[in-house]
Structure formats: C-alpha cells, structure tokens
Amino acid sequence: MPLYFQLSQQLEAAIEHGALTPGSLLGNEIELAARLGLSRPTVRQAIQSLVDKGLLVRRRGVGTQVVHSQVKRPLELSSLYDDLEAAGQRPATTVLVNTVVPASTEVAAALGLPEGSDVHRVERLRLAHGEPMAYLTNFLPPGLLDLDTAQLEATGLYRLMRSAGITLHSARQSIGARGATAAEAERLAETEGAPLLTMQRTTFDDTGRAVEFGDHIYRPTRYSFEFQLLVRP
Amino acid sequence: MPLYFQLSQQLEAAIEHGALTPGSLLGNEIELAARLGLSRPTVRQAIQSLVDKGLLVRRRGVGTQVVHSQVKRPLELSSLYDDLEAAGQRPATTVLVNTVVPASTEVAAALGLPEGSDVHRVERLRLAHGEPMAYLTNFLPPGLLDLDTAQLEATGLYRLMRSAGITLHSARQSIGARGATAAEAERLAETEGAPLLTMQRTTFDDTGRAVEFGDHIYRPTRYSFEFQLLVRP
DNA sequence: CAGTGGTCTAGACCACTCT
DNA sequence: GAGTGGTCTAGACCACTGG
C-alpha cells in the first residue's frame, strides 16, 4: 500500500473521527513531512487526494484547512441496485425481457453500432419493499457479457459488468420528466399521465467503447437523484 | 503559467485537433520529458491532469492512450443562465420577488442558520426565446451579496456570487419530478398536474459555509439535465 | 525479458497572504 | 518579513504488462 495512500487514509479517518475539526489548520507540509519521516511530495500527494475529495482546502500563504461542512462524496457512476441496497431498501428485480433485437436508430447511435445489428435488450422492473420503483430498459452490444436472467435478478447490471472484467470509465446522462403512458402506468402502479422521472445513460469503458445504453423511468414519489458535486478548481 | 499546465494544454489541443488520434499511445514519460527538456514529475503532472479530465488513460506496462470516445467534461456546478447562453438560447430573467423573509425550517436547515432568522428570498422566471422555461426560488444568507434586481435580470446568480469574491466549492443536489400546482402551471404556461422537473440545491463556498439554497421547477419539454461523469479510479 | 507507469526522495526557488 | 503552498528538478527503485 503506497505511503501517500496510507497517510491520506489516516487523515481522512482523523477528520471523520473528529480529531481534526472543521476549520482547523493541518500544519505546514514540510514540518508534517519531517515528523512523519516522509518527503514533502509524498505528503503533498496525500493531501491533494483529500483536496480532490473535497475534504480539505488549500490556500497559499494560509495553510491547509479541513472543510467546514458535510461534503460526503462527489457524484459517482451509481447503480440503482447499489443505491437501494445502501439505503437498506432491499431491492428486488424482475426480468421481463431478455432477448436479442436489431438496433434501432437511437440505440445504434448510442452504442456506436450499425443500425439493425444485433444488440441485447433487457427490461427489468426494480422493486423496493415489494413496491415498483423503476422500469429499466437496457441495450448492450453483443458478446460483451453473459446476460443470465437469474444473475440479473440477483444483482445489478453494473456489478455484473465489473465482475466480467469491464472497467467502467465514464457515462453520459440525461435526466428529464414526462407523463406516463398507459402501459408505463400499469407497470409502475401509477395512473396514465402521472409524472415520471426519466433517465437515459450511455456508459463507456476505459477504451472509450460504449458498453451499455439505458432508457429508464422512475416513480418520482419513490425515487429522486441525489448527488454532491465539486467545482473544478 | 506553470510548465505542466502549458504542456497539458498543448496535449489537449493536439487531441482536440486530431494530431493525437484516439487509441494512440503517447510515448513513454521519460523520453517525453527528455524531449521537452522537463523533468518526469512535471510531465506526469501534465498527463495526470488530462487523465483526471478523462481524455487519457494510463495502464501500467502498456502506456498512456488517448481515450476513444467523446468524453467532453465531467459534471460542473452549472448555472442555468450559462447553460442557456452556451446553447445559444438567449436567456432572459424576470425577477418576481426580491425581499427578506424569516427562514422556514427547511431553509434554515439548508443554510445552517437559526429558524426564523432573516434570509434573502429571490424568485425568478427564466425564459428562453421568450418562452418560460423554469421558475427559480433562491434563499441566501444575509450580508453576503448585494441582490440588485437589475443585475439579477442581466446575468445569473452564480456569476454574481463569483464576481462578489465568493469561491464556489461544492453543492448538494436533488433532482425529482412531480405534477404542477395550479399556481405553478400558470407561471410556466402549463396545465395543472403537468409533469415538472424539480431540483433542490445547496451550494457551499470553500470554507464550507452554505451560500445559497435553491428550490427550482423546470418545464421538462423545454429542459433536461445533461451531464457527463467519470468513474473515480 | 524489456518497457511501461507507480511511487518516493531531497533538495530548490517562487508567489502569495498575513501581520 | 515570515510563513505558507505552488512548482520544478534529477535522480532512484518497484510492480505490472506483454511478447
């Protein structure tokens, strides 16, 4: 385990734990380095990682301070399944469609494939405490992943992708709202025209290849998107 | 201008410009440093900043590659005004309320002030091409900013805050949806019960102080939240 | 095995902030 | 003017990847 990482973890623990109180100065880097028997660049790297996380603020001529307030973590490429599980909501999934279809214009454009070529199509109803929460439609390029229905019902899609050795790298998201169609209303136990939260997302791996396109609808009384974000310095 | 910054800008320009094509290797760091007459840490710092932006990917034992696809930029703390202006939509603002009120429980909690203490309340109708697009309600702690109605109609709130010397640092956002009330429908030229996109946001400066709380509604036929995000390595 | 990025050191000078 | 972080150098060894 790298030294700078060990140090940043210690500092983070100290902040979390209250040993370093908000607003307090961290002490100058050179002395900190001497005290720890590390070089200054190593100490700086540790501090920088916490600045990137939003836990510390540096000011030239002043020092390094612990941020006052509740910055928890920046937006992550989150999985609805993981979000629900973290919130103690006991997610459940019903796979309604798991098939191969020709790519529509929209799907082909999102995945960077020729129109009409084969793609996997998966439709899942996501429940929490037995109540429908979201209806998830995903398209994946062929040959990337074994889309086993049992596995899809037991865990989230992102977790399946990661365990298949796919390194998720970035995603392009769009969040909007619209009224439910009759079919959507029935699936989500809502009424026709009821407000729905919508999200489209294309996910890319670290080579820049599109690995997933999703078109999802959420019941806004049951789910909202919450996230923390940091201003780029 | 720092050397590493100059280099990262040159590299970014080369990527944008097509001189460095997606998937191409950047060449090893030590040789690059020698060729440019820089030290390796400086070159690494330049490369790292582009990795953070999502333009490059490093793999040990392999090299540094240009990412294949269209990663533009991660989510920023964006201003609706700036978003609209960047999209060529000619934003206009009508200030409907600009006053001081006692803080409600919700507002007091968001801003970290005592309940009932004075806060600024600003309500603005934001239009694009003359059509209502959003209704923005903001609360600000007292004494932070001169809330001049003319200035609020000429630019965005964030720009006003930045020019007042406030360093925006982070924000906590929540995006949801619900049906419009009769009053909201009238303001936005919608019908009662029409789906609306909602966003609550608390913004913090670099000392961790809450500097703004906003409770906004958007017409989903006219606006959606679009952003790119990177997976934290 | 050769080549790559990942980590680390020990120094140096500069720019900024505050008193 | 004293103290801080910001930048930069010139080396070194290690861990991982690929042929």
Image: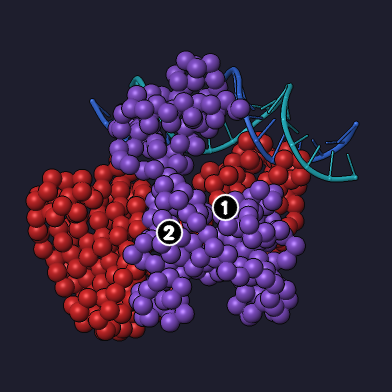
Chain colours: A red, B purple, C cyan, D blue
Mark identifier at residue B155: 1
Instruction: Tell me where residue A111 appears, x and y as whole percent.
Output: 22, 49
Residue A124, compared with residue B228, is above or below; it is below
Residue B195 visible in the shown view: yes
The outermost residue toward the front is B130
- Label 2 crowding class (10 Å Cα cut-off): few <14, some 14-19, many 20+? few
To which chain does the residue with label 2 belong? Answer: B
Residue depicted at x 39% and y 51%: B228
- Label 1 crowding class (10 Å Cα cut-off): few <14, some 14-19, many 20+? some
- Reading the image, the residue beneath label 2 is B130
Residue depicted at x 39% and y 43%: B72
Instruction: Tell me where residue B143 appears, x and y as whole percent.
Output: 75, 62
Tag 1 secondary structure: loop
Tag 2 secondary structure: loop
Q: Where on the picture, by quarter, is residue A224?
A: bottom left
Q: Amino acid at mark 2?
A: Gly
Q: Amino acid at mark 1?
A: Thr
Mark identifier at residue B131: none
